[in-house]
Amino acid sequence: MTPSDWARGIADLHRTATADGTFHYTFFKALAVNPSAVG
């Protein structure tokens, strides 16, 4: 991530607080298994 990417993301977050701003999110859950520990 570059400094300009970060600044653009922060600016986008600030825009969500404006009268026409929106914010959407999605949660992901994952489970990892170490094959060598299963046995």
Image (tube, rainbow, N blue to C red):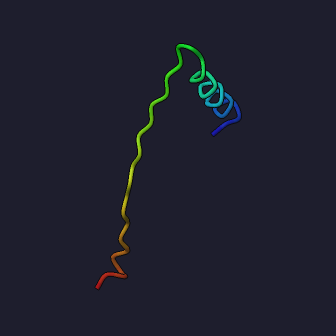
Q: Is residue 22 above or below residue 32?
A: above
- Tell me where residue 1 appears, x and y as whole percent: 63, 40
- Which residue does the image show at 60% across and 28% down from the upper left? 13
The quadrant in which residue 38 appears is: bottom left
The quadrant in which residue 36 appears is: bottom left
Say left or right for 1 vs 3.
left
Say left or right for 38 vs 24.
left
- Which residue does the image show at 39% across and 49% down from the upper left? 28
Total numbered labels placed on residues in the image: 0
- Which residue does the image show at 59% across and 25% down from the upper left? 12
- Tell me where residue 22 appears, x and y as whole percent: 49, 22
The single residue placed furthest to the right in the displayed view is 3
The single residue placed furthest to the top in the displayed view is 20
- Quadrant that contains the C terminus: bottom left
The quadrant in which residue 2 appears is: top right
The single residue placed furthest to the bottom in the displayed view is 39
- Tell me where residue 14 appears, x and y as whole percent: 64, 25
Q: Is residue 39 above or below residue 21?
A: below
Q: Nearer the viewer, residue 32 or 27?
A: 27
